[in-house]
Image (cartoon, grey):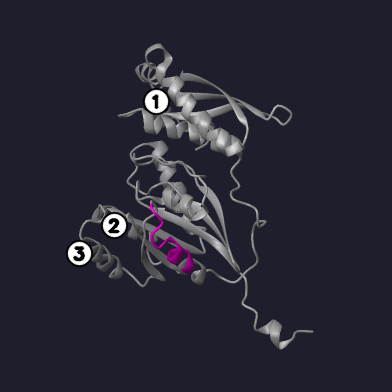
Amino acid sequence: MTTDLDSRKTPFKSGYVTIAGAPNAGKSTLLNRILGEKISIISSKPQTTRNRILGVCQRPGAQIVFYDTPGIFIATDPLNAKIVNTACGAIGDADVLLAVVDAAHPDPAAEALLADKIGDRKLPVIVALNKIDLVAEKKTLLGVIARWSERRTFAAIVPVSALDGTQVEELIGAIVKALPDGPPYFPEDTLTDATERFIAAELIREKIFRLTGEEIPYASAVTVEAFKPSAEEKRVSIEATIHLERDSQKGIVIGKGGAMLKRIGTEARQDIERMTGSKVFLKLFVRVQKNWRRDTKAIERFGY
């Protein structure tokens, strides 16, 4: 029997929210800020994210399932084409689309490409104007707001800073408002569906992006051949391989006397230890797979 009190209960809201935007707009930083945990790797270089990353945000009366996606850009090789297809496919799977725009460094061409991918889809679209902490003049932000306001009707346009958290809670509120009614998709304690093995590989790749230059980050992939936790010893043993395209790149990644490889391993190990809560023994190998970014079989083998 339904009482008047039951009928006045606020329905639970849940849904999938795809985070889309140009490379380096701050999508992964924003997701990490919302979740309060690092599940997506970040660097100052564009095109760091290559996979669709799922993150679950719990709020009173709501569960938001985020998809962090690779940046949308004009692809020039098979790897990048697959990466962009991953991002565009995630847009089609969303209940709500969160378009993240770099408000500090306006790029009308990148914004137009993102707007074209959004098109006239019949779903709520929220625009997060990110990096407002770096906006020097108010008129710059007002110009970006005006440009997006003219494109279509949005559920909300929210200026935010993923770096310092400014207005992130307001953004979450706008997302919850746009969600459909429905039950939670995941248990309350779920943060992501990514395995620790996958995140370990991503953390190693993040260090390559942060510590090396030029074409090396984009020519690198990481696979984990062994991931062996020992509950008794509170230790995880990991063997991983860094794949590159040329011998010259291999020499740079290893470094003089192995110094660069050691630094990559040390910084990755520290992050993996924070993730697992265990001591980590990390062994890295470096191999050359010539022109793997143009080899569809290699791309699939490396998890893209």
Residue at 38% of width from left, 33% of height from top?
210
Q: Residue furthest right?
A: 1
Toward which corner of the image does residue 82 lie, by quadrant? top left
- In the rendered image, the residue lying farthest to the top is 257
Task: Indicate which disc, 3 or 1, sits on the residue closer to the N terminus.
Answer: 3
Tag 3: amino acid:
Lys
Spatial separation of the CA atoms under disc 1 and disc 2: 36 Å
> 239 or 29: which is nearer to us?
29
**What is the C-alpha distance between the residues marked 3 and 2?**
11 Å
In the rendered image, which residue does mark 1 sit on?
291
- In the image, residue 53 lies at what x, y percent? 52, 47
Residue 273 x/y as whole percent = 57, 33
| Residue in the foreground of this view, choosing between 142 and 225 | 142
Q: Which residue is mark 2?
A: 103
| Figure check: 57 above or below 50 | below
Q: Residues in magenta?
A: 164-173
Label 2 neighbour load within 10 Å: few <14, some 14-19, many 20+? many
**Residue, disc 3:** 139
The residue sitting at 37% across, 13% down in the picture is: 256
Please, what secondary structure does the residue beneath circle 3 have? Answer: helix
Residue 212: quarter of image: top left
